[in-house]
Image (cartoon, rainbow, N blue to C red):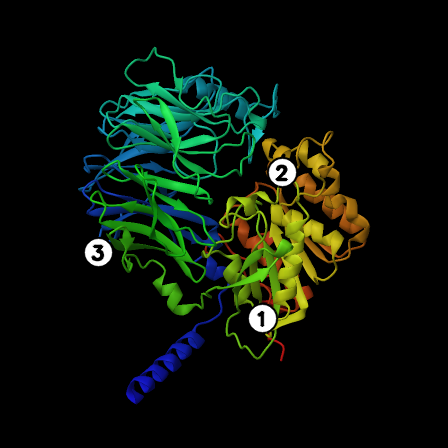
Amino acid sequence: MKRIGLLFTIFVVALGSAQAQKRAFTIEDLYRVKAVSDLSLSPDGKKALFLVAASDLPRAKRVTHVWTMDIDGSNARELTHGEKGENSPRFSPDGKWISFINAADSSLNLMSTGGGEPRKLANLSTGIADPLWSPDGKLIAFASDVYPECGGDDACNKKISERWEKGPLKAHMADGLFYRHWNAWKDGTRTHTFVVTVASGEIRDVTPGDFDAPSFQLGGPLQYDFSPDGSELVVVSNHDKVGATSTNNDLWLISLRDKDSEPRNITAANRAYDGSPKYSPDGKYIAYRTQKQPGYESDLFRLGVYDRGARTSTVLTESFRNWIDDFEWAPDSRAIYFGAQGEGHNPIYKIDLAGKAITQVVSDKTIDGYAFTHDGKRVVYIKRSVGEPSEIYSATITADKAGAPTRLTHVNDALAAEVDIRPAESIWVEGAGGAKIQVFIVKPHDFDPSKKYPLILNVHGGPQSQWEDAFRGDWQVYPGAGYVVAFPNPHGSTGYGQDFTAEISGDYGGKVYEDVMKVTDSLEKLPYVDRNHIGAMGWSYGGYMMMWLEGHTDRFKAIASMMGIFDLKSFYGATEELWFPEWDLKGQPWDSALYEKWSPSNSVKNFKTPCLVITGERDYRSPYTQSLQFYTALQKMNVPSRLIVYSNAGHWPSSYEMALYYTAHLEWFQKYLGGGGPPWTTEQFLRNAVFDPETGKRITQSAEPASSKMAKPRQ
């Protein structure tokens, strides 16, 4: 026993020494992290396809390439090498071909699994996205944004687009709502679903008309699927007259054999969302995600099944009170695997169709994608956690339970060996109404529990979403500069039951504000937190909450608001998805008092806290004029403040644009909280004066900014 204890002591000392030898995480290190995504398996289950994205910060580039490996992780290699990268790789049903999108021209390409040069199968001037093979391998479906009057006539689409783009007049016109969406003007275009014949390259528009089919979504499962015999396609589309106020996506069946047949709506009885359809392998059913409350985008996502023979739908997961994310059928069509959010994780479950029994199969922090082998005996998945960038893992399945995972990829090993990537801890705090609020905490590099550190509290957006135990820049860049960071999941967050999620609707600045205050009360009592140097930041709804904090408390030394909402009445008139404020604020500004009650603009006279404001001109979800109004109010109240406006960014800036975001936050918080700062100034990076894009080297400055030094903790 003494020998075992001695060996354990030696191990702990060695581990601590190894950690101490690693250096602090920086902004530049974030751009050395490689991201693994878009995992799929070959039909025989022997090989995997996936994407690896790598960044070149000095040259403002981020490129994704297709990789393959054997199912045990051996023989990993990069398959594609295009200058602009590739995406959406998929095996053909017979396993002989790999399809992918060439990012240089958005063309659909095929390459043999045995090697050789790829060939273009389809190329449209309007671009190609989200390819899907038919089960017989004869067709590939994809989506493209076209002018309805042109449909699949690419020459027609190209003529209109080029004339508009190259002409002397630049203007937009609308005769209805939804004239712009997310970060782009519609300008009369619609998303249509096409099929291309693999043998001939013939392309056909199978969803002609003045509707988006599939409907717009930000990520998530595909919105169309082939029947097992390849005779039918199911596509998600919303045909309501005013799409801006409707979440009524439906499933439409389209015959691929009878071109004259009309699409059939199989979910017309439900006026709320229906989407993400997938046929069962035996062809008897279509599984899909469904909601029950019309106009409520954050209603519980349930798993439904449509019986093709009986033409009836059944909800399988009504008793499961967290959102269903992606899912896939078991090979025998008797069960469905699905991912779901839960307390900062997203495990994979299995539900039996006959008895509706639900079993948790895999739980491993944040699972970004997964695939089961055809025999159901193995699951391969992409996993990340706060302290671990994304990698691929595999686990055997026995009696519906995954065994110990085996790591298959090692794309970030070199960085992890050099840099201190900090893990998260989780605590629970009593919030509004006695509810338990989960808070993730990341401690700084070279953490010493006997010292005190400045703290940054980060409120998430959504607002119906959750902070997950997942690698992301905010959780590493600031701890690398000497800050403790905390990420609470307050009322309105997902993963804690639908009732908890629903409590934010109609209560925008209520329980969440109380949660934030009580979480801060608890955090400032931690022995290693400097209670006199606490800041707060947030994005989207989190940006709104920063604006709300500005007018309702002066306990924070500095605040940073990104893409926030300042004046709810004017926000309603400029945002695009009107169902969102109409549900969360219970009506329109002229018939709901909540727009007035919860507007930060009504508390301007209380503004005191120094505030950084960041926004993007192409943000049509939280229009950038909201941040301009907020900044004007700060300036008129003589509150120290800084405004940064991205010219080309929408609600989510690009990877390169985010480097300015991290720089500005570090500089701002160093000034008011006393922690470490960025390796260059905000002005230098904004003026493109940090890197030479030709050589990739740092531009020599007259003097290194003092902010580049990491702050020392307080004794």
* Quarter the C terminus occupies: bottom right
Q: Is residue 466 visible?
A: yes
Circle 3 residue: 74
- Residue 666 position in % (x across, y down): 60, 61
Circle 2 residue: 584
Q: Are marks 1 and 3 in contact (CB under 8 Å)?
A: no
Circle 1 residue: 709
Q: Position of 552 compared to 226: left or right?
A: right
What's the mark number on residue 622? Answer: none
Question: Which structural element holds mark 2?
Answer: helix
1 or 3: tag closer to the N-terminus: 3
Q: Are marks 1 and 2 in contact (CB under 8 Å)?
A: no
Q: Nearer the viewer, mark 1 or mark 3?
A: 3
- Residue 551 position in % (x across, y down): 75, 52
Q: Nearer the viewer, mark 2 or mark 3?
A: 2
* Quarter the N terminus occupies: bottom left
Q: Residues within 10 Å of mark 3 (few under 14, many from 20)?
A: few
Spatial CA distance of label 1 from label 3 is: 42 Å
Question: Which structural element holds mark 1?
Answer: loop
